[in-house]
Amino acid sequence: MTRIVVDPLTRIEGHLRIEVEVENGVVTDAWSAGTMARGWENILVGRDPWDAPYVTSRVCGVCEGVHTIASNQAIEDAFGIELTEAGRLMRNLFSAGYYVHDHFIHFYVLSALDFLDIMAIASYEGSDPGLLAIKSKIVGLVVAGDTSPFTPRYTPDEFSVSDPETVTTLVSHYLKAVELKAKSQKMLSYLTGIQPHPNALMPGGCTATPSVEILMDLKKLWQEQADFVNNVYVPDVMAVGYGPLLPLAAAGFGATDGNYLAFPMLPQGSSAAAGDISFGGSNPMFRGGVIKASGPRGTLTDISGLTIEDVDYSQITESVTHSWYDYPAGTDALHPSEGVTAFNLKKEGAYSFLKAPRYDSMTMEVGPLARGMVNKFPALVDFFNAGGREGVVARHLCRAVISKQIINDGLAWIDRLIELRLKGPLVGMNEKAVPKTGKGMGVWDAPRGALGHWIEVDNHRIKNYQLVVPSTWNAGPRDENGVKGPYEQALIGAPVPDLDNPINVVRIIRSFDPCIACAVHLIDPHTNDVKVVKVS
Amino acid sequence: MDIASLRKPELTRRDFMKVAGMTAAYFGISQALTPQIVQALENNAGKAAVIWLEGQSCTGCTESFLNNLEPSATSILLDTISLRYHETAMAASGHQAEAALQATIAEGGYVLVIEGSIPLAEDGAFCTVAGKPFTEIVRETAKNAAAIICVGACATYGGIPRSGPTDAVGYLFRGKELHHYFDDVGAKPVINLPTCPLHNERLTATIVHYLTFGTVPELDQYNRPYAFYGKIQHDNCTRRGNYDTGRFVTDFGNPDQHGFCLILKGCKGPVAKQDCWDRKWNNRGNYCIDAGHPCVACSNPEFYEDTSPLYAHNYDFGLPPL
């Protein structure tokens, strides 16, 4: 048995350390730990509640905006604020636009290098002038002896795409994706002031007052994003997912235990009273829900008949049995509205500073695949019919499908906003003073999954603030019953035929799009006393 | 959009021209020097090596850096600099990433970019990479660097994490105070480019300025280039006329107050030193005040510990005599 450590696990947000045990070429056990913390929840205690959306957006510079939204919703819940229509539309447009570029950047920039043999470009023999320019660029780097940041890299294996034309095309899309991300951020700055880190989204809505001209420019940029998603991103994901990666998909590669949780998001109606909770509106574009596993991992063949339960937010808890925190004596798990952030570095049996979120005492995978399962995406049903299963490839597929729906359906919100603006000034805010006391919850289905913020206000100041974020759900450790977190589950059974080249380990973890700065509220001072064989 | 157009990357010499022209413009130096900048970039055999460390970061500064459009971020990455270590962008993981870092350190002479604050508490245990405290990584990497550029509020003065339990500091400063934690790495230029997050143009121009002239731009007492941080937001505010005539936003939801001065909503414009009023953000898309959001002075060393509450008018500056 050999212990492999991958630290830093790069091309993610934040600092993540993955340890796996490998026996006979297969992963038999796994641990995931974040290695950086700043004490974010503690910073907010005693502050003016209005600071919270600004500060929590800085938990993470990648999924910044969704924290602002969840924080705003928690405050609106505590203060009793209902959004204006323009406020809801601007918030939706921000979230939707951000969502889409976050997903294609994950595919091209953060994940693709795990599946592409990038040096195949040197063998490109076609005549496309654009692709030839890419070839000469990459070959130029090789000749100059400096191929950073593309090297060093893990050795490509039999699942890597090595056809020169495909690889060269995908690298050209990689470059285009970075440019389109910058354009998306410019588009979103019209609503948020600056990007990343939206400032104008405040409790009560949005302070921006875009002119018709700005909204028309926003629409133009939105259309450009839609063209890229419809004509490039989705076809690329389909080509790879139904092509070279279908064998991995059919094997359930990187599947978790099969419990899924999604929160609602992108409300399209004005009343908040409808059953599926989404503050600031009803009729969410994507519904929330819970799926409990019905069989062994990665063996589900038909998702069309799955039972979807409504989310009961009182069923959410965080356990710290294997985390470096103390809870009051006799307490194994706490609801986030009563959450405690008090760490104990000497705690026996603890190995992570992520808490272990559970729903009805069960571990849950959150994120694009959960959203796809809960909403029974037709594209996902087709993928299962074609032999695909839960896991790495299905996660990438769901991101593309979600992006397509959001970017295409979102155009109607821009048109409605323009219509409102033509009638008069946009009223994006419904401002209310901080109450003396109050409690609130905000939930949103962030790109990486179910996100919740809980706030308690006392004497006009924040008394307690707790975040339960997607990457804590997915990257958390074992709980009081010894049940592993989703990352750990997904790694078990992964083939690692070459101990020096654990490419499957990083493929699995990156398919979740880890966001570890969000996930860890305190750190891993982990002095690493286990026996470690470093991968060389 | 024509699909064929997607395949035409702009990876030509014109990008050098764009970088050069931009740098000259941003630093207020003569466009006549553009050819000299182009030449410096072209003569930079093997390109300038850059190590980009992330400590207690949120990756927001990296995100912001990637927002460069003219020239594109990929053009800067592939044509202008050689990014040897950057956890979010590099292909390598684990031991390979470590090896790339060590090889570049051994080579020496690189530009070191630091993103994120540096926690000193518990001997640096609040941030470790590959089992090493971040303090140790910074010290090791700073030793052989030619110049150090700290990006964002965190790496410069501690940023928001300075208010937390980890004794988070910037490379040179803990808020306004100097600290001497990294004295042993030798005298070398340290340039601070604060704001939350980093403004991408300020970094690109600073790197190119350094590569061209071999010197750092003129800096203020907090090591910020005067070219970017020499003027006060309030003196140049697009809403200044409303301040002078006493028209203030008191209710964000009142459309009659659109465009009014934000000072009663906690705007820190009178103490904020930055050129956002001129430069704007996201390729001239917008900036906070134009979006109706008060300036929070995120370029100042006292951000956020001493600028909170962000939206209350309790700062030590008054209103105009009316």
Image (tube, rainbow, N blue to C red):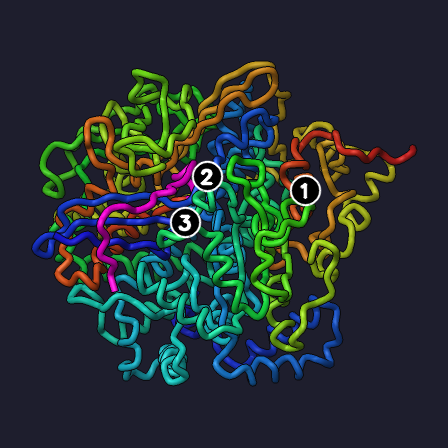
Residue B290 position (above or below residue B3): above
**Same chain for marks 2 and 3?**
no
**Same chain for marks 3 and 1?**
yes
Outermost residue toward the front? B184
Residue A66 disc label: 2
**Pointer 2 and pointer 3: residues touching (CB < 8 Å)?**
no
Q: CA distance from mark 1 to mark 2?
A: 27 Å
- Say which of marks 2 and 3 sits in front: 3
Residue appearing at x 16%, y 32% in the figure: A293
Residue B302 disc label: 1
The disc numbered 3 marks a residue on which chain? B
- Say which of marks 1 and 2 sits in front: 1
Q: Which residues are magenta?
A: A517-536
- Sequence-wise, the earlier of marks 3 and 1 is 3
Quarter occupied by the N terminus of chain B:
bottom left
Residue appearing at x 32%, y 33% in the figure: A323
Q: Nearer the viewer, residue A115 or B178?
A: B178
Local crowd size for mark 3, using a 10 Å CA cut-off: few (<14), some (14–19), many (≥20): many
Q: Is residue A531 magenta?
A: yes
Quarter occupied by the C terminus of chain B:
top right
Magenta region's main secondary structure? Answer: loop
Amino acid type, label 2: Val
The disc numbered 1 marks a residue on which chain? B
Q: Please tell me whether mark 3 sits on a helix, a strand or a loop.
A: strand
Q: CA distance from mark 3 to mark 1?
A: 26 Å
Q: Disc 3 marks which residue?
A: B128
The disc numbered 2 marks a residue on which chain? A
Local crowd size for mark 2, using a 10 Å CA cut-off: few (<14), some (14–19), many (≥20): many
Left or right of residue B285, residue A499 in this image: left
